[in-house]
């Protein structure tokens, strides 16, 4: 019942494949039985005498759609030029107290938590429902089509991993070597050919949303955005919009912009503020934009996004749980699935976000990379709380 999105149906079918509920065959069992009967009817020339199999009621027979556990791998080159998986604290990926600095940056070394392909294969074998590769320095220049190592990582991972792969970073139009112009659609196409199931758009989606609302206010023409172009060719199920907001706390004397949705966060502000809005950022959280997370999510859905990956810079690396207030606000604003991100540190955080919000998936990174918590532990905890969960054989 209700609108089912493609990737949710896939996960639902995966969950249902080996089940027989109350003696009623599942979708896969029905299909197998129907194919067998059809072949026999053709052979015996009795096809006209066959009748359709009864279709069991979806609401009474099948389990709920599973809640997905997504693992994110933040990928970048370290100071030696090697492609590594790293993890930041509020998006800062360099060591703060190692005592070692690099000659080039004068700062701590980039945290190295492992090689992208081997880590991704480990998470697939441990039961991750989806894996996301995020190229976190792609905004600095260059382009995907010249980024051979990242494409090679995706190609190698897709040979051995059979859950959805999302890749993000640098999906935009740009001018490459020799002055050659590449469209965002061409960039996305290259990622899809390398094995991606979905692409994640960050900064470009912010600019597209701002243009969308500007046209709504003033009318006139608007150029087709990269988000729309990719969605029209590959379908909404292949396009994820990643939102990176940061809280802007408001004092009692502040008059908020009418375009911003003001919320009451669980954490009070540095000066005791009890309200805030969530300001969107671009370029890895380094540049603030005038649009807030709720407005961006609404525009993203209207422009053709099929899913929202919802981060919160304030919670990133804290291991204190997801921002439930933000998650609920965005879930209420859109009809497409939302992935909760930023803040997970324990198995309880997954149960909490699934029980207290409407998110369809929850993403974590550092707690898995550091082996503080295992995917199996998370799923066992979810099962213990009665949450529908996909389990591998």
Image: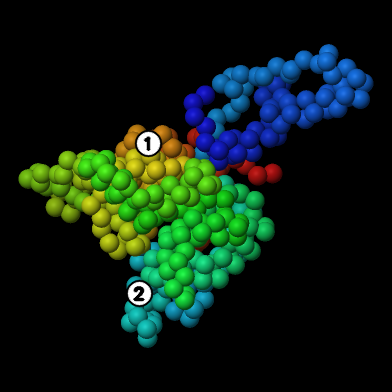
Within 10 Å of the Cα at label 1, are there few (<14), some (14-19), or many (20+) other Cα atoms? some
Per the model, the C-alpha gap separating discs 1 and 2 is: 42 Å
Q: Is residue 325 above or below residue 144?
A: above
**Color theme of the render:** rainbow
Q: Report the side of 207 relative to 38 (left or right).
A: left
The single residue placed furthest to the left in the displayed view is 253
Name the secondary structure under disc 1.
Answer: loop
Residue 191 placement (x, y as % from top left): 55, 59
Residue 152 placement (x, y as % from top left): 59, 67
Name the secondary structure under disc 2.
Answer: loop
Q: Report the side of 377 relative to 262 (left or right).
A: right
Residue 71 placement (x, y as % from top left): 51, 53
Mark 2 lies on residue: 97
Q: Residue at x 62, y 62 (%)?
A: 155
Residue 282 placement (x, y as % from top left): 32, 59
Of residue 40 and residue 134, the one placed in the foreground of this image is 40
Which quadrant: the C terminus?
top right
């Amino acid at each position: 019942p209700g609108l089912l999105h493609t990737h949710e149906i896939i996960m639902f079918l995966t969950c249902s494949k080996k089940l027989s509920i109350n003696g009623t065959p599942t979708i896969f069992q029905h299909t197998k039985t129907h194919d067998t009967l059809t072949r026999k009817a053709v052979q015996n020339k009795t096809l006209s005498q066959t009748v359709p199999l009864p279709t069991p009621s979806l609401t009474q027979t099948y389990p709920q759609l599973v809640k997905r556990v997504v693992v994110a791998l933040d990928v970048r080159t370290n100071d030696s030029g090697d492609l590594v998986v790293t993890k930041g604290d509020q998006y800062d990926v360099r060591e703060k107290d190692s005592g070692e600095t690099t000659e080039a940056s004068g700062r701590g070394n980039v945290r190295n938590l492992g090689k992208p392909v081997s880590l991704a294969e480990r998470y697939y074998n441990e039961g991750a429902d989806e894996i996301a590769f995020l190229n976190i320095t792609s905004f600095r220049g260059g382009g995907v089509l010249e980024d051979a190592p990242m494409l090679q990582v995706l190609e190698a991972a897709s040979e051995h991993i059979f859950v959805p792969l999302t890749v993000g970073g640098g999906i935009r139009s740009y001018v490459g070597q020799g002055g050659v112009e590449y469209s965002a659609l061409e960039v996305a196409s290259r990622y899809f050919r390398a094995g991606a199931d979905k692409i994640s758009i960050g900064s470009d989606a912010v600019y597209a949303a701002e243009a969308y609302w500007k046209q709504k206010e003033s009318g006139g023409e608007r150029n087709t955005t990269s988000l729309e172009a990719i969605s029209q060719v590959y379908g909404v199920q292949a396009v994820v919009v990643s939102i990176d907001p940061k809280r802007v706390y408001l004092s009692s004397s502040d008059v908020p912009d009418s375009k911003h949705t003001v919320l009451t966060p669980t954490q009070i502000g540095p000066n005791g503020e009890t309200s805030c809005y969530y300001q969107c950022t671009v370029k890895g959280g380094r540049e603030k934009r005038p649009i807030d997370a709720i407005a961006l999510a609404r525009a993203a859905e209207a422009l053709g996004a099929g899913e929202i990956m919802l981060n919160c810079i304030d919670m990133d690396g804290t291991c204190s749980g997801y921002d439930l207030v933000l998650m609920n606000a965005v879930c209420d604003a859109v009809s497409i699935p939302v992935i909760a991100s930023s803040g997970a540190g324990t198995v309880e955080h997954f149960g909490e976000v699934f029980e207290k919000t409407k998110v369809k998936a929850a993403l974590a990174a550092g707690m898995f990379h550091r082996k503080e918590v295992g995917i199996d532990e998370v799923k066992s905890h979810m099962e213990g709380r009665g949450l529908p969960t996909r389990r591998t054989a």
